[in-house]
Image (cartoon, rainbow, N blue to C red):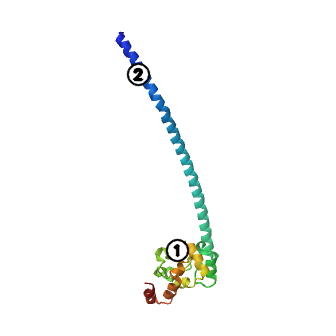
């Protein structure tokens, strides 16, 4: 073995040792970052799992309530869709067929979307609340109106401001031309 070879081996050994030392210090930092990221991911998965469990519990509760409400409405003992006792009282005091789901066939329903401010989606929500005819809306009391606005998520005073009862009365009496002239 020549001296040059020994010097070369020694140089490679020293360079390898230095390279190992240099890479070692950065390796610990990357490992800490990896562990931190891993812990954060595990915590996120646990949080999402808890949210999923809460959501599943809530869905099961809502499905149970819906089944109970459907069973009660088929018997006719319950106000529709949780509108409240004021809406149920309206059905008892002669507000038409309001208060029982499915009490009317599509042929027995008026096109409530003709009332300005209701629209198609509003009509379906009114039908869900048990309001199917113009006369049902025209006969709403102030208490029933407030309960309906709350159920629909509408701003208090919307029914009065948009004159739903007046429009419904005109349409119920067959005065569509007068309704069109007055309300556009």
The answer to which quarter of the image holds residue 14 is: top left
Number of residues whose C-alpha sits closer than 10 Å to that of mark 1, classed few (under 14), some (14–19) or many (20 or more): some
Q: Are marks 2 and 1 in contact (CB under 8 Å)?
A: no
- Cα–Cα gap, marks 2 and 1: 79 Å
Residue tagged 2: 15
Q: Is residue 111 above or below residue 39?
A: below
Residue in front for this viewpoint, 56 or 9: 9
Q: Quadrant of the C terminus?
A: bottom left
Q: Residue 147, position in %: x, y? A: 60, 76
Residue in front for this viewpoint, 70 or 176: 176
For image coordinates 60% across by 81% down, the residue present is: 142
Precedes in sequence: disc 2 or disc 1: 2
Q: Residue 169, position in %: x, y? A: 52, 87
Number of residues whose C-alpha sits closer than 10 Å to that of mark 2, classed few (under 14), some (14–19) or many (20 or more): few
Q: Please identify, in this view, whether the residue under mark 2 or under mark 1 is nearer the observer.
A: 2
Q: Secondary structure at mark 2?
A: helix
- The answer to whether 174 appears left or right of 55 in the picture is left
Q: Residue 31, position in %: x, y? A: 50, 35
The answer to which quarter of the image holds residue 99 is: bottom right
For image coordinates 58% across by 52% down, the residue present is: 50
The answer to whether residue 100 is seen in the rendering is no
Residue tagged 1: 125
For image coordinates 49% across by 34% down, the residue present is: 29
Tag of residue 73: none
Q: Residue 168, position in %: x, y? A: 51, 85
């Amino acid at each position: 073995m020549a001296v040059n070879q020994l010097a070369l081996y020694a140089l490679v050994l020293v360079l390898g040792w230095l390279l190992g030392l240099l890479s070692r210090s950065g390796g610990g930092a990357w490992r800490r970052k990896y562990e931190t990221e891993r812990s954060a991911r595990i915590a996120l998965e646990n949080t999402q799992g808890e949210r999923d469990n809460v959501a599943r519990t809530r869905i099961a509760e809502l499905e149970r309530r819906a089944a109970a409400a459907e069973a009660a409405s088929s018997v006719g003992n319950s106000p529709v869709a949780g509108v409240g006792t004021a809406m149920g009282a309206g059905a008892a005091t002669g507000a038409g067929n309001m208060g029982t789901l499915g009490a009317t066939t599509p042929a027995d329903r008026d096109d409530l979307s003709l009332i300005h401010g209701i629209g198609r989606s509003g009509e379906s929500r009114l039908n869900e609340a048990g309001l199917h005819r113009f006369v049902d809306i025209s006969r709403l009391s102030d208490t029933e109106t407030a309960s309906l606005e709350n159920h629909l998520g509408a701003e208090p005073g919307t029914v009065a401001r948009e004159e739903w009862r007046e429009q419904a009365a005109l349409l119920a009496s067959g005065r569509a031309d007068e309704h069109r002239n007055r309300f556009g």
